[in-house]
Amino acid sequence: MKEFLIETFAHHRTLIVFLHILSAVVWVGGMIAIRFAAHQSLAMIIDPKVRLERAAHTLKRLFTLVTPFVLILIVTAVMMAVGLGFRAAAMDANGHVIDEYAMSIYNTIHIKEAIWLIMSINLGAMMFRRRKAELALNEGNLEEAKNALMLIAKYMVPVNIALGLTAIFIGVVLRNAY
Ligand code: HEM
């Protein structure tokens, strides 16, 4: 498996890095567009039922759009992490540190992995809440739908935007670190 990943990365390096960056652009850029453009536009709809229905639908479109890119991001991340040989440069076969600088770069990879995991869990939780809001709307419970959607707009999307921007920054740091 490791040899396969190393060989695939060696042969398709440009494509793999491109897909990694494209996935970050769609995921993080998509959230920024929804939070800072669509959200303000939706808020101008006067009828609360229509407003909440449009908001739930907009989020559904966003989540459906980003899901494949979340998966492409982790697949390309694993290919890069293995293909660029971060562990091999930092440790020997017995797990002993052989290079302190390479080890610090390898630890940075773990930070990115943790960020991806938190962002994905947060995305899953947002999908769950959005579905809850949709069901509440179908039952005519506007208050419950509003509460479910408010949390997504106020905290959950901004948290993922901040984490995504941090991951992009760390990506730039990694690119210039070796
Ligand atoms: C799953 C864990 C992740 C790993 C192991 C990982 C690994 C890497 C590595 C090794 C690079 C440097 C590529 C190179 O040298 O050409 C990189 C670049 C990059 N990463 Fe990640 N990444 C992860 C998650 C993420 C996430 C969650 C985002 C954003 C949502 C992201 C966005 C980027 C971007 C935009 C670059 C390009 C930076 C540049 O070209 O200067 N990565 N990543």
Image (cartoon, helix red, strand yellow):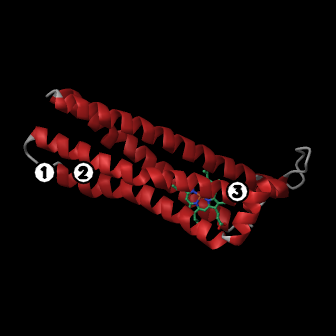
Distance Cα–Cα, label 1 vs label 3: 45 Å
Please state which amino acid type lies under the numbered disc 1: Met
Image coordinates for residue 82, horizontal then vertical, percent: 74, 56
Of label 3 and label 2, which has the lower sequence position? Answer: 2
Secondary element under disc 3, as helix, strand or loop, is: helix
Callout 1 environment at 10 Å: few (<14), some (14 to 19), or many (20+)? Answer: few
Residue at 43% in and 60% down: 26
Residue at 49% in and 59% down: 24
Viewer-nearest of discs 1 and 3 = 3
Please state which amino acid type lies under the numbered disc 2: His
Q: Residue 177: in sight, yes or no?
A: no
Residue 78 picture quarter: bottom right
Viewer-nearest of discs 3 and 2 = 3
Image coordinates for residue 112, horizontal then vertical, percent: 61, 50
Q: Nearer the viewer, residue 105 or 123?
A: 123
Image coordinates for residue 49, horizontal then vertical, percent: 12, 38
Q: Nearer the viewer, residue 137 or 40?
A: 137
Please state which amino acid type lies under the numbered disc 3: Ala
Q: Is 53 located above or below residue 81 in the figure?
A: above
Residue that carries the numbered disc 1 in the rendered image: 44
Callout 2 environment at 10 Å: few (<14), some (14 to 19), or many (20+)? Answer: some
Of label 1 and label 3, which has the lower sequence position? Answer: 1
Numbered circles on residues, count? 3
* Quadrant the C terminus occupies: bottom right
Residue that carries the numbered disc 2 in the rendered image: 39
Image coordinates for residue 138, horizontal then vertical, percent: 18, 31
| Badge number at residue 81 | 3
Residue at 91% in and 48% down: 93
Distance Cα–Cα, label 2 vs label 1: 9 Å
Residue at 43% in and 44% down: 159
* 161 with respect to 73 (left or right): left
